[in-house]
């Protein structure tokens, strides 16, 4: 526990368990670094998880994640009980939840109200929920009861953090909760996407390093690229993996002479370093997703020099379609032109397969400009922490 500043306030940080598949390791390191640099008093509520690898599920462990969250609730309850006198003297105790879809958090709302502990404040970062009808929670039939939980959480949380405007619009449309609009702040995601460049094993081959920031800006990586078209998602229905197979079939029929690999990221298990290496080799990454509240896989692919192909919907509109007037709310600021992005209309995805094939063929065979690393100005760090600082 860090106690160097803000003597009358304290932060309880309830992270997602560290999972390679979910970027939670990176998020948790980012948060702790930010808290430490600001001299904030915080308690890192990270109990021993049931397991460190996913047993059931694509990007979270079904039983493990709820075991972990229940242990977090138990630890917070223990602290509230044993340190109640001390905590009651503080101006504020902020409980920050890294994943707002948190069954059991309502028990802490109950404690606040029953014991009149009004200095307890709750903030949550939401990633998805049953309000998104393309999300697996809805697909598995959880909305009939999940909607009631979500409404109770949105009443109980004092502040709700979302990554991009699309997510805000979706949540407000699907959950008509009094006062919800005023509670929402747009903050991006708690990580530096440029880290994918530094974490790559090819970093030693890259010469233009900034000695002060250790980040790369516009470096030519053409010599590292291979003729790879990548599907950088899990193979869940909302990501439409069948369209990637259709794309490969159509491409090989239309351009039989091209030597090209179509790769599913999840065809084999890869750690983050191996995944970023694959992105650095990739010339084209594409998405047909119908569920995406940020789209970090496509942002990282773009960072690592790949051309990206995305539909004009979801968070992709916020990440890859913007103008300067919108940048006060957008999560990602591209410092170069978006020459390496194809955004196709949001209608029947299959109807665009042929033009996508033509675009890939052009990139593979006729691209004249080099493949370059893209430095994205990460305005999330100051924005995210500015929101927390305004609460703490």
Image: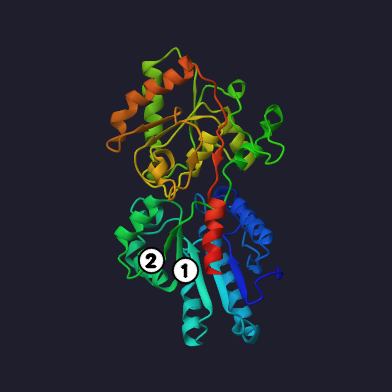
Where is residue 123 shown, x and y percent of the image?
Answer: 50, 67
- Identify the residue at horizontal 33%, vertical 60% (top origin): 172
Give the crowd class for mark 1: few <14, some 14-19, many >=20 residues within 10 Å.
some
- Sequence-wise, which precedes: disc 1 or disc 2? 1
Q: Label for residue 103?
A: 1
- Identify the residue at horizontal 37%, vertical 59% (top origin): 130
Q: Quadrant of the C terminus?
A: bottom right
CA gap between label 1 and label 2 equals 23 Å
Where is residue 29 shown, x and y percent of the image?
Answer: 65, 54
Seen from this angle, which residue lies furthest front? 325
- Identify the residue at horizontal 42%, vertical 19% (top origin): 361
Query: How was this image coloured?
Result: rainbow
Seen from this angle, which residue lies furthest top? 257
Where is residue 253 shown, x and y percent of the image?
Answer: 37, 18
Q: Quadrant of the N terminus?
A: bottom right
In depth, the one of 161 and 74 nearer the eye is: 161
In depth, the one of 5 and 13 nearer the eye is: 5
In the figure, is residue 247 to the left or right of 283?
left
Residue 13 occupies quadrant: bottom right
In the figure, is residue 326 to the left or right of 195?
left
In the figure, is residue 225 to the left or right of 295?
right
The reply to whether the C-beta atoms of the residues labelled 1 and 2 are less than 8 Å apart is no
Residue 317 in the image: above or below residue 257: below
Q: Label for residue 182?
A: 2
Residue 132 visible in image = no
Give the crowd class for mark 2: few <14, some 14-19, many >=20 residues within 10 Å.
few
In depth, the one of 222 and 242 nearer the eye is: 222
- Identify the residue at horizontal 54%, vertical 67% (top origin): 96
In the figure, is residue 272 to the left or right of 152?
right
């Amino acid at each position: 526990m860090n106690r160097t500043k803000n003597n009358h306030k304290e932060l309880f940080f309830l992270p997602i368990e560290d999972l390679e598949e979910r970027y939670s390791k990176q998020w948790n390191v980012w948060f702790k670094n930010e808290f430490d640099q600001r001299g904030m008093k915080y308690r890192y509520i990270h109990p021993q998880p049931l397991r460190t690898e996913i047993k059931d599920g694509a990007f979270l462990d079904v039983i493990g994640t709820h075991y972990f969250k229940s242990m977090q609730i138990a630890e917070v309850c223990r602290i509230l009980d044993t340190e109640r006198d001390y905590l009651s003297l503080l101006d504020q105790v902020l409980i920050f939840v890294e994943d707002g879809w948190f069954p059991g958090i309502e028990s802490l709302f109950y404690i606040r109200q029953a014991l009149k502990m009004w200095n307890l404040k709750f903030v949550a970062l939401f990633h998805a929920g049953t309000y998104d009808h393309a999300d697996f929670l809805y697909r598995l039939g959880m909305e009939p009861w999940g909607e009631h939980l979500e409404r109770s959480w949105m009443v109980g949380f004092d502040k709700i953090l979302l990554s991009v405007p699309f997510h805000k619009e979706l949540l407000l449309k699907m959950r008509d909760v009094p006062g919800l609009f005023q509670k929402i702040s747009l903050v991006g995601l708690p990580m530096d996407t440029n880290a994918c460049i530094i974490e790559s094993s090819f970093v030693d081959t890259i010469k233009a390093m900034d000695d002060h920031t250790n980040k790369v800006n516009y470096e030519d990586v053409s010599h590292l690229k291979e003729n790879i078209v990548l599907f950088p998602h899990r193979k869940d229905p909302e990501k439409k993996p069948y369209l990637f197979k259709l794309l490969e079939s159509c491409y090989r029929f239309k351009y039989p002479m091209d030597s090209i690999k179509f790769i599913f990221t999840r065809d084999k298990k890869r750690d983050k370093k191996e995944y970023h290496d694959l992105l650095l080799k990739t010339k084209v990454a594409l998405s047909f997703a119908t569920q995406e509240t940020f789209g970090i896989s496509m942002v990282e692919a773009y960072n690592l020099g790949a051309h990206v192909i995305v539909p004009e919907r979801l968070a992709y509109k916020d990440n890859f379609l913007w103008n300067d007037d919108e940048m006060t709310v957008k999560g990602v600021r591209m410092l170069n032109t978006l020459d390496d992005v194809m955004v196709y209309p949001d209608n029947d995805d299959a109807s665009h397969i042929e033009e996508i094939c033509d675009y890939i063929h052009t990139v593979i065979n006729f691209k004249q400009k080099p493949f370059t690393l893209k430095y994205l100005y990460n305005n999330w760090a100051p924005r995210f922490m500015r929101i927390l600082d305004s609460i703490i």
